[in-house]
Image (cartoon, coloured by chain):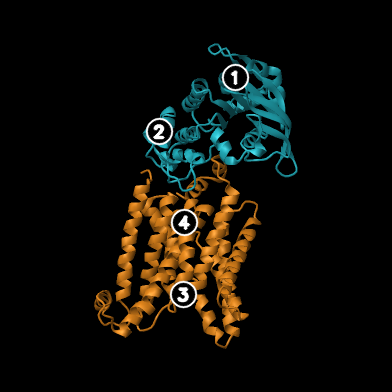
């Protein structure tokens, strides 16, 4: 019933164990058969290690798993925040057009030849902000901004940005083409430790920061006037939360491309399992989101082996029916 | 007795029409003040101004002698508990969790509620007789039960002042009386200042120490119920003929509206 620190820690611990299991499993399977067990024990006991196996496990699979986990964590936490603030279970970075906004920012950077280093996440963030501003200002033109309108406009803006990306693909023919293609559907196949190094602090610090606002999210979720009466500075909190969630989403998108629906599926499953308290919802969604994404990416690289699917295809394949189901059973309201 | 509120010539407008025009009045500590008036007279706006949910364009509001402008929302939430006009509460939080949210103004960002907070919540649940409901989902409760839960949440804020906006609308008679008795009890035993917007003149007359009558954003009368509820004043403010006599049990003024149009009465009967 009532959330205590112990209960929170216990549940998080269980989800970390789940993540460890999924990670080990993901490490073991793939197109090339690798004797994972022997490679790892050889490393531990300082015996001679097969260099090919070592490379596959620790230079290809592990960074990819870590990056997938971080991306899943970020997108799921952002989904929790957007759903809380908009009071709509359908909100998440992709549906709101924020992921596509980040993608178009990154694509423009590539087109103008600055698609490297700090420029890429920066332009992605700017794209995410522009997209969010666009979605909210379009939605606000109506006298009463309903969250369903925001979702609808988000989906349309998202489609518009995707078409822009398609346009850039059509007019690009040089080496930049493959770099742009990457943005259409999420792709984790070229993950590096460097990317993990960028996203890890963003995900962890962002998660801790957002957790600090989880009680405010609970209260805002029961009504904005009520939140003010209870001492929550609603406007400021919303601005901060939208900003930080967009920022972490943009950094994740800059490293992985557009991966949709994760932020929809994961928070909803967590809400079914643990109830509406954001102090539980946010960390569990982050941790379970990581496991979910690692599993999805493992599927992406194994189901049509030796070929690969972009991981965004897997999440969309699961997420789109899920979206429809949520829309039909719950409408766009909390129940 | 000091002053809980001092409202000094405030005016307020949403867009271009003034909702409240040059309103001044005082709220004494530990008093039970009723704000009555016809629809659209500015009652709800006035209550929101007193909690800094809205800001007046002119004039000032002083809470315990300090200008509301200079107090942050969190400190206000430690002094004032609010029960807003009841709207359907669609939440899957439990009653206990909702009442626990009343402790929020006392907690820092990463702090969890402690034993002290739980005790206060239990007291609030007991006082409002919602302790039996504490594990229920608040979205599944009836209107009267939800209203009690919202009062419990306001009490968990340990307020010196309660602001209530028509806490008994949509409730049946028994629950209306229950809420008023609860508020009177809190007012008398805990010395909580109660400011309540009410549609029901007769209940307000029975339970309030003092009344403020609003009409079109101005104060049309204020004082003890006997002073405000007269045939002349009520007729001019509500624009209907009324009979005012004395409730034989409570000795407070009693209002009965009537219609002189016999045809329309006949229509109503058939």
Rounded to the nearest angstrom, the CA distance separating label 4 from label 3 is 22 Å
Specify the farthest residue to the front. Answer: A46
- Residue sitting at x 60%, y 64%: A129
Q: Is residue B84 above or below residue B180?
A: below
Are there few (<14), some (14-19), or many (20+) residues within 10 Å of tag 4? some
Q: Are marks 1 and 3 on the same chain?
A: no
Q: Residues within 10 Å of mark 1 (few under 14, many from 20)?
A: some
Q: CA distance from mark 4 to mark 1?
A: 50 Å
Which marked residue is nearer to the observer: mark 1 or mark 3? 3
Disc 2 target residue:
B119
Q: Quadrant of residue B240?
A: top right
Disc 4 is placed on an element classified as helix
The Cα atoms of the two marked residues, 2 and 1, are separated by 31 Å
Report crowding for label 3: few under 14, some 14 to 19, many 20 or more residues within 10 A (C-alpha): few
Chain letter for mark 2, please: B
Labels 2 and 1 in the same subunit? yes
Supply the letter of whichever chain is orange. Answer: A
């Amino acid at each position: 019933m009532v959330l205590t620190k112990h209960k929170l820690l216990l549940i998080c611990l269980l989800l970390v164990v789940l993540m460890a299991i999924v990670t080990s499993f993901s490490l073991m399977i793939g197109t090339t058969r690798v004797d994972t067990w022997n490679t790892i024990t050889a490393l531990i006991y300082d015996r001679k290690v097969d260099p090919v196996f070592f490379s596959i496990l620790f230079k290809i699979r592990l960074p990819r798993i870590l990056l997938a986990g971080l991306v899943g964590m970020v997108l799921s936490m952002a989904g929790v925040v957007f759903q809380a603030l908009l009071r709509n279970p359908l909100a998440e970075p992709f549906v709101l057009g924020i992921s596509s906004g980040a993608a178009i920012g990154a694509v423009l950077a590539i087109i103008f030849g600055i698609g490297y280093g700090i420029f890429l996440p920066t332009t992605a963030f700017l794209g995410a902000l522009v997209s969010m501003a666009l979605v909210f200002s379009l939605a606000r033109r109506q006298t009463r901004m309903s969250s369903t309108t925001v979702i609808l406009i988000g989906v349309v803006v998202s489609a518009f940005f995707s078409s822009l990306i398609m346009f850039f693909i059509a007019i690009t023919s040089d080496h930049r083409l493959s770099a742009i293609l990457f943005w259409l559907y999420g792709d984790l196949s070229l993950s590096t430790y460097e990317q993990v190094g960028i996203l890890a602090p963003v995900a962890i610090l962002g998660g801790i920061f957002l957790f600090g606002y989880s009680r405010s999210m609970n209260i805002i979720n029961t009504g904005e006037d009520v939140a003010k009466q209870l001492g929550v500075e609603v406007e400021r909190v919303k601005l901060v939360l939208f900003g930080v969630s967009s920022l972490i989403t943009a950094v994740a998108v800059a490293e992985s491309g557009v991966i949709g629906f994760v932020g929809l599926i994961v928070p909803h499953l967590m809400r079914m399992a643990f109830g509406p308290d954001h102090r539980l919802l946010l960390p569990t969604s982050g941790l379970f989101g990581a496991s979910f994404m690692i599993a999805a990416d493992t599927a992406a690289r194994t189901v049509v082996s030796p070929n690969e699917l972009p991981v965004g295809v897997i999440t969309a394949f699961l997420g789109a029916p899920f979206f429809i189901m949520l829309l039909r059973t719950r409408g766009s309201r909390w129940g | 007795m000091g002053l809980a509120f001092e409202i000094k010539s405030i005016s307020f407008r949403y867009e271009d029409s003034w909702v409240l025009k040059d309103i001044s009045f005082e709220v004494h500590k530990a008093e039970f003040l009723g704000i009555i008036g016809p629809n659209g007279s500015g009652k709800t706006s006035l209550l929101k101004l007193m909690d800094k949910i809205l800001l007046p364009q002119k004039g000032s509001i002083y809470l315990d002698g300090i200008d509301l402008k200079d107090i942050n929302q969190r400190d206000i939430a430690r002094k004032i508990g609010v029960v807003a006009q009841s709207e359907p509460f669609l939440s899957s939080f439990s009653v206990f969790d909702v009442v626990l949210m009343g402790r929020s103004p006392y907690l820092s960002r990463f702090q969890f509620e402690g034993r002290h907070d739980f005790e206060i919540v239990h007291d609030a649940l007991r006082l409002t007789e919602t302790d039996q409901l504490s594990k229920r989902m608040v979205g599944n409760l009836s209107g009267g039960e939800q209203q009690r839960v919202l009062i419990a949440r306001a009490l968990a804020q340990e307020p010196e002042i309660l602001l209530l906006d028509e806490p008994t609308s949509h409730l049946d008679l028994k629950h209306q009386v229950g809420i008023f008795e609860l508020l009177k009890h809190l007012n008398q035993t805990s010395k909580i200042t109660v400011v309540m917007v009410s549609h029901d003149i007769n209940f307000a007359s029975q339970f309030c120490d003092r009344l403020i009558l609003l009409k079109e954003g101005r104060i049309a009368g204020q004082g003890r119920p006997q002073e405000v509820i007269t045939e002349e004043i009520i007729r001019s403010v509500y624009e209907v003929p009324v009979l005012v006599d004395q409730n034989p049990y409570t000795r407070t003024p009693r209002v009965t509206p009537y219609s002189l149009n016999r045809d329309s009465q006949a229509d109503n009967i058939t």
